[in-house]
Image: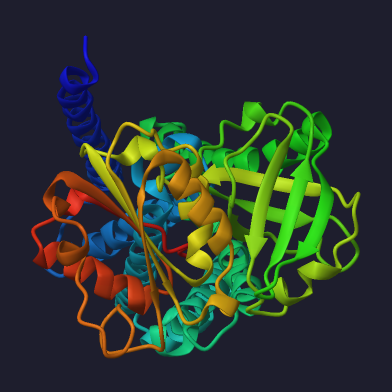
Amino acid sequence: MSATTARPTTAHHRVRASARRGWWADGLEAAIWFAAAIGVALMLHAGGLLVTAPIDYLYTAGRAFGIVATVLMLAQVLLVSRAPWVEGALGHDRAASLHSRAGKWAIILMLTHAAVIVSMTGYYDGRSPFAESLALFSQAWYLAAAQIALVLFLVVLALSLAIVRNRWRYERWHTVHLIVYLAVAAAVPHQFLEGSTFRGGDPATWYWLALYVVAFGSLLGYRVLRPLVRLRRHDPRVAAVRTLPDGSTDILVSGRGLEALRAQPGQFLLWRFMDSRRWREAHPFSLSAAPRDDALRLTVKPSGDFSGELSELKVGTRVMLEGPLGVFTDRSRCRRGTVLVAAGIGVTPVRSMLEAMPADEPCTVIVRIRSGEEAPLLDEVRDLAAGIGAELHVLEGPRGASWAPAGTDVSLSALVRDLHDRDVFVCGPVPWADQVERDARAAGVAAEAIHRERFGW
């Protein structure tokens, strides 16, 4: 069979694989709401709808709000557990986005649940909502803990607002986000110790226990145990550190049997450097070269407290790894050709993908830089593009109104004539990447053929 005959077959398989990934992703999102519906149904089956007066419907609705909020909270935990079956279906960006939406709705529903239940129990007891809240706080430790949890969730919600969050560095936001785990721990006891929904050994109890085991088991297994096992099994260590001409830091991490990680060019990992200054924090950085059996490479642009000090890493420092993460890889393709578009340090996943790109398929590389002196890995990109016959466009100049340099009238469709038959991979600053995506969509590129990595957190 000739290469010409094989290409449509390959494209056909890519389209089918892309459709399957979409079904799995949509199905996983739908499963969250299906789990909530089952929880409400179990509550009603257990006698949750005992109505002696019309106002009792409100109390039942309050209980239902709490059940849905609990499922969304558990979904949040699962979505950040780094479980491969979640990451592989949704991709890191979609998982992070869904995590954020689920969290906001969980807090809103928790607040509604608390307001309705306190108001209704106060109505039954002949007390005001405030007096009933104080009574519940002093009645049992788990009810007091639930009220404390609600306050903590409200703090997280306030700090999650874009106007606040966009002003925080990753390091500070990551620390604040740990409040969520404290709030969850404080909220859990009252669900099993108060009322009949979670007690008595009935099917509802086992159902909720199963949900908690899956969510928190995934969190413990993939966020704690797996990185520790990898640290012992693969012994990843910093093998070399060098400062590139543009100021970026290039880090080579060596280890035993790293192929077992199954990392793909274009993916990223969470790297925790186990020295006295950095062991508390894990940060996301893309692979800047195709992974080898004995080594992984990352290239970091100084942009914060953590990244600015990586040039001081010592050779031999142990490295704890989470991942690989993301679907910014060749496996996500659904078209015959490829366009790789990068700006700034967003060139790192593009450079690693280019290293593994087949030479017999159309490939165009577009690199947006401010100046040659500030462009990381540009020489390597040039060499790799030349090696496989890829077309390379380097757009140099100050920032303009569009994604291209100021005073330059450039579009993706002008640079790539068969753009509709290409997958477009975009990595760079979010506002810039938004402009590239809008340009691609305006040129008729289908949504499923546009791939981005935002490192959502």
Along the line of sight, which residue is nearer the eye, 302 or 19? Answer: 302
Residue 348 screen position, x and y as percent: 53, 57
Camera-side residue: 357 or 115?
Answer: 357
Relative to 73, say whether 217 is above or below: above
Q: Residue at x 91, y 64 (%)?
A: 276
On screen, residue 378 versus residue 14, left or right, reads right
Quarter of the rendering containing residue 456: bottom left
Task: List x then y, in percent, for residue 13.
Answer: 21, 25
Residue 7 falls in image quadrant: top left
Q: Position of residue 148 (x, y in %)?
A: 57, 75
Looking at the rendered image, the quarter that the N terminus falls into is: top left
Looking at the image, can residue 446 be seen?
A: no
**Residue 350 visible in this rendered orientation of the protein:** yes
Residue shown at 65% from the left, 54% from the top: 298
Of residues 241 and 450, which is closer to you in this image?
A: 241
Counting the numbered discs, the total is: 0
